Image (tube, rainbow, N blue to C red):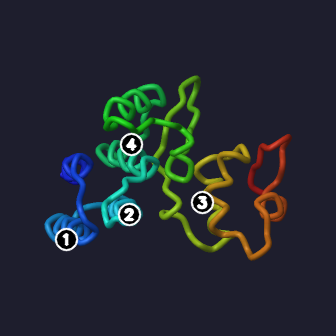
Amino acid sequence: SVILSLKILLIQSITIEQYHQILTTIQQDNNDIPSPILNFLLKYKFTTDNQTKWNIIYLSQLYAIDIFLSKKEKKLKKEFLSLWKESLPFGCTANIEYLKGIAVIIEENTLEYYYYYPISSLSTDVFQRFQQLFTLKKKWKKIEISPYVQSILQPNQTIENCLIKHTRSLRDDIYCAR
């Protein structure tokens, strides 16, 4: 599995060439690897001495994505956070800040669920993006919607200006569709 390959890579110090060779092999052998996982694999950084230096945030996000993709359903917040924390290798943390732009919290009755909702699955068209966001959730806190808006901003446009233009503010930092 991809996660097993990553765990092996974590304990090794490899060169950039070896890393690219391993990544190419993973891609060739596993055509069914979801593109979000491959995108995260490509974001790792290298030190000046040509050795890998793993980005802990991306690695934590990768493990979260793996949990979401293992069963394509919403996850109870407490259960997801517990499973995520237990699955991470030493040195990584299950910080909910790392889920911004990857998953959203959906409240149903009195329960909270994490729902896998990566930015990459949304339209790049501003109007369609907001339509998709408000189809999933009727009300968004500014802190929740900001990661989903950031990539569609016009030059010199702020998140606040974009939200004013395309949403309706209900009260402090709560937005809904126009």
Q: Amino acid at mark 3?
A: Gln
* Residue 46's disc number: 2
Residue labelled with disc 3: 132
Q: Is residue 114 visible?
A: yes
Q: Amino acid at mark 2?
A: Phe
Label placed on residue 85 = none
Disc 1 to disc 2, C-alpha distance: 15 Å
Which of disc 2 and disc 4 is earlier in sequence? 2
Mark 2 / mark 3, whichever is N-terminal: 2
Graded by Cα atoms within 10 Å as few (under 14), some (14 to 19) or many (20 or more), the crowding at tag 2 reads some
Dot placed on the residue nearer the N-terminal end, 3 or 4 = 4
Cα separation, mark 4 vs mark 2, equals 35 Å
Is 4 or 157 nearer to us in this picture? 4
- Identify the residue at horizontal 79%, vertical 64% (top origin): 158
Q: Which mark is residue 21?
A: 1
Task: Kindly indicate whether the residue at mark 2 contacts the one at mark 4 (C-beta within 8 angstroms).
Answer: no
Residue 19 lies in quadrant? bottom left
Q: Nearer the viewer, mark 4 or mark 1?
A: 1
**Nearer mark to the viewer, of 1 and 2:** 2
**Nearest-to-viewer mark from 2 and 3:** 2
Q: Is residue 172 above or below residue 50?
A: above
Pointer 4 residue: 73
Q: Is residue 170 above or below residue 38?
A: above
Q: Amino acid at mark 1?
A: Gln
> Where on the picture, by quarter, is residue 97?
top right
Labels 2 and 3 touching (C-beta < 8 A): no
Q: Position of residue 60 (x, y in %)?
A: 41, 44
Would you call the spot at circle 3 few (<14 residues within 10 Å), some (14-19), or many (20 or more)? some
Q: Residue 108: x and y, percent?
A: 56, 31
What secondary structure is marked by label 3?
helix
Label 2 SS:
strand
Q: Position of residue 75 (x, y in %)?
A: 42, 35
